[in-house]
Amino acid sequence: MPPDDAASPILTVRHLTVAFGPAHQPVRAVSDASFALAAGEILGIAGESGSGKTTLCAALIRTLPRLARTAGEALFDGRDLLRLSEREMSALRGSEIAMVLQNPMTSLDPLFTIGNQIDEVRRERRVALSAVELLRRVHLTAPELRLRQYPHQLSGGMRQRVLTAMATAAVPRLLIADEPTTALDASIQDEILLLFREIRDTAGCAIIIVTHDLAAIRRLCDRVIVMYAGRIVEEGPTGDIFRTPRHPYTRALLASLPRFTADEVILQAIPGQVPNLAELPAGCAFADRCTLVLDRCRREQPVAVAAGDRRRVFCWQAEADT
């Protein structure tokens, strides 16, 4: 079940920034991101490629490239993930925090059977359930057969279920899924989304879903964060965001969803290009693509504006409308 609004957050992120390149001229892949996540909540993080979604999550689980620099804090039950030693972080990974990566074929070793790889995870995390039981928990058909097979012998949906079984073997308190439905057909996507909801309902863990698929967020998530050029631009309950988007970028994203008529599929692209993160403007990064741009938008970085119950939007136009 979704969390109680009054529940204490399991994860609190404050002013998280991830930078690459020289210190005197940094490229900020994530800038000043702040949000909280309650136990049992499913949070969707949406945005175009290059918006900082995956980098933000990689910072949380500490899998960034070595040259990356982080600032801010990410408190997981009071422990700052950004400042834990590698030994302390390794103890959290897999046991309390787990991640399902985007491409199962690059995450699973092609030289070992599914059973070999699940057994390795079971040993590392001291999981009592058998490999067959773990596969049954994610509703994989014929689990005894799958254990003897290699990754290439499974469909994309099956491989995604295997990764999910491995990630949740130790029943983590926080599960991060990076584009878990990419390259899957619509019916399999629905099955995977239902699986994540079932994991939340049975295990009570918090889940972060990173995706560019707004339809998936609408079906699965309690709350959504929209990112653009490394910054959070809007946040709120999923239903509210979809009914009344406040940021021009959120509106453009929703307008770009396919619309079907009797004769055709209508696609509305967002004009312009995502800016180069090394050459971001002083003001709002979306200004050059925005139809509602103000002079102030080009000069000043927008600050958070309350836009309703548990909602905020980073937009000068939204401030003018309140």
Image (cartoon, helix red, strand yellow):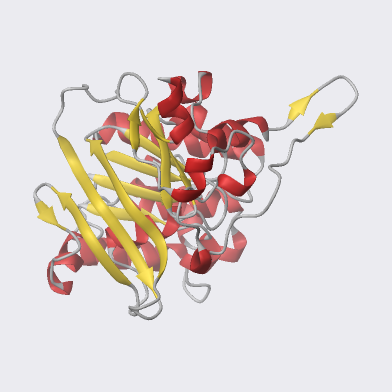
Lateral position of residue 148 relative to residue 304, left or right: right
Front residue of 245/45: it is: 245
Q: Position of residue 146 (x, y in %)?
A: 50, 55
Q: In which quarter of the image is the C terminus?
A: top left
Determine the residue positioned at 15% across, 27% down: 7
Q: Position of residue 284 (x, y in %)?
A: 48, 47
Query: How many marks overall?
Result: 0
Q: In terms of image quadrants, where is residue 119?
A: bottom left
Please give the name of the residue rendered at 54% of the width and 50% of the height, measured from the top-left corner. 158
> Residue 147: image x %, image y %?
45, 59
Residue drawn at (13%, 66%) of the image:
84
Measuring from the top left, give residue 309's x and y in whole percent: 31, 19
Reply above or below: 298 against 235.
below
Quarter of the image with the N terminus is top left
Direction from residue 124 to residue 43 in the image, left or right: right
Instruction: State whether residue 261 is above or below residue 152.
Output: above
Instruction: Give me the residue at 22% from left, 34% from top.
Output: 38
Q: Residue furthest right?
A: 263
Residue 272 seen anywhere in this rendered image of the structure: yes
